[in-house]
Image (cartoon, rainbow, N blue to C red):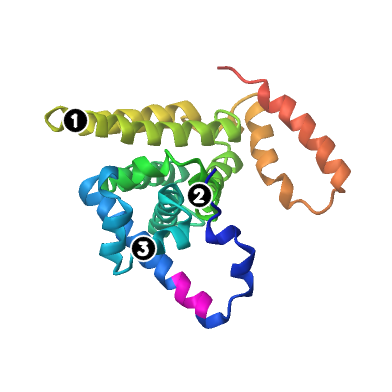
Amino acid sequence: MRSPTPSSDPAAAVEPDGVASGREQHRQRVIEAAADLLERGGREAVTTRAVAEAAGLQPPAIYRLFGDKDGLLEAVAQYGFAKFVASKYVDPDPADPIDDLRAGWDLAVEFGLSNPALYTLMYSEPAGRDSAAFQAGLEILRARVRRLAAGGWLRVDERIAAGIIHATGRGAVLTWLSQPEPERDPALLTALREAMVTAVTNERPAVRDTGPAGAARALRATLPEQTTLTNAERQLFREWLDRLAADHVT
């Protein structure tokens, strides 16, 4: 069983402020050193000795800060998600929500292609996906999907749409990285992106179509903002909208 990391150590909560601050600085330095080694030499390059040397610390410091190498790799994965979220530009009111969807997808793929080893680690460490940064990234994606739904552009359920967008972006990166460089064709990325757009959006807003499904999805997206209904009424209304939204032509 792995020894606990500092974040789960009760003693950390009672450290003096100066000690805690210094510890966090050392921790961040180690994470950045490990991330740099990861990108330059792959996962095998991230040894406790190499990381400690790059960070200017002694190897035992790695174990005090992270428990073991697995704990360090989990922290690097969380660092990757934080770096990704920091790179995102979020337009709260895009002129064209479908172009905004394309831009968001392109940005996610570009991050993976620019940080291949880090990206691969991010999706191989389950603990990284529990981090606040990963959840923040998901919320940015959900907000894009919500805008599509509110405008009547969404062809499928919001949850399914988010899953398709996330899965196609991740699949595009990992597929690209798995190919020999001479065989990598940018047309593949464009085709995958457009397949994603076709899968989750309508060619024109569904609220202009005959039938209740598109209108139900659009109304459902704005339902949380309504204050004239009680919680019980909103819950019942959402159940009705869910049933109407599910009754669409595939």
Choose top left, top right, bottom left or bottom right for residue 113: top left
Is 61 included in the stretch rendered in magenta?
no
Q: Element at badge 2?
A: helix
Please identify the residue farthest to the top as the structure is shown: 250
Query: Disc 2 marks which amino acid?
Result: Phe
* N-term-proximal mark, 2 vs 3: 3
156 relative to 235 in the view: left or right: left
Q: Which residues are magenta?
A: 19-24
Query: Disc 3 marks which amino acid?
Result: Val
Q: Position of residue 74 (x, y in %)?
A: 45, 49
Dot 2 and dot 1 residues touching (CB under 8 Å): no
Magenta residues: mostly which secondary structure? helix
Instruction: Report the Cα–Cα distance between label 2 and label 1.
Output: 29 Å
Q: Position of residue 205 (x, y in %)?
A: 54, 34
Q: Which residue is mark 1?
A: 185
Q: Which residue is mark 2?
A: 134
